[in-house]
Image (tube, helix red, strand yellow):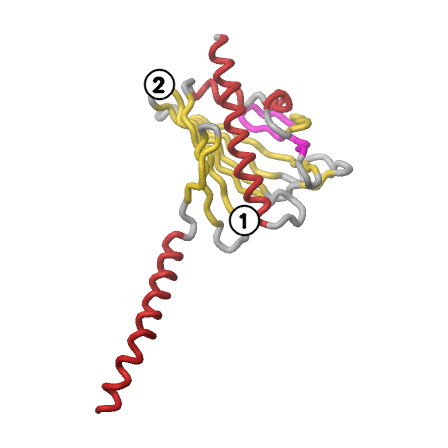
Amino acid sequence: MGTARRCVPRLRPLLAAAVTVLTVVRAAAATEGAWQRVGDRDGVAIETRALPGTSQREVRATAHAAVPPATVVAVLWDHRAYPQFVPHVRSLDVLRDDGDTRLIYERIGMPVVKDRDVTLRVTRTFDAASGVWEIVSDAAPDAGPPVARGYVRVQNSHSVWRLVPANGGTDVSYDIRTDAGGLLPGWIVAGAQKDGAAHFVRAVLDRARQSHSKD
């Protein structure tokens, strides 16, 4: 009995450490897949979250635009104009246009690493009851032309623009996850996605504001 009593104090630090580890593990499990705000860039809030089972991270950029959703949609759906105002888009071809669904092919200039090309299937939807627009893009690597010389093909990409009428304007969110093609480390891809998402949203909203002021 005396031996057992002497062992209890020695076990207490081990028990406390075990409880701490268990608490950390539970907290990590609870936050896995949850959005984490990582900063703001030029009025655009940036969040990221892990994609379970992969080394990828999803990025979400949000902002408020003082223009109606239809104005933002008009800019987003003007694909042929992207090289004029979207950073890093060198060229864009609309391969097929079925009204609210398009197949597009982009060539994207990249700093430091090789340039990328991607074929995307883009779909536009509108919910009349709520006034919400969504534009969804998915990589379709085998539906477009062969990989351009000097480019790396993006094989996996999924993005969603969601435009919600709010406060006389539009609450804008843009979510994207992609492997960016090639063998780039995850941290490089994540950093490029954060900057790219913020710049894309800012460019779209600036053009929408300019277009609205002309009307």
Give the answer, above or below, for where 5 lies relative to 168.
below
Kindly give the residue lying farthest to the left in the view shown: 1
Number of residue marks: 2
Question: With 150 as the anchor, is 92 left or right in this view?
Answer: left
Badge 1 marks a residue whose secondary structure is loop
- Residue behind mark 2: 168
Along the viewing direction, whichever of 27 and 14 lies nearer the viewer: 14
The residue sitting at 65% across, 26% down in the picture is 94
Q: Distance between the residues labelled 2 and 1?
A: 36 Å
The front one of 83 and 132 is 83
Q: Is the magenta stretch mostly helix, strand or loop?
A: strand
| Residue closest to the far right | 149
- Which residue lies under the disc numbered 1? 56
Percent x, y of residue 75: 53, 20
In percent of the image, x 42 and y 53: which residue is there?
A: 32
- Mark toward the start of the polypeptide (2 vs 1): 1
**Residue 84 horizontal side relative to residue 145, left or right:** left
Highlighted range, magenta:
96-109
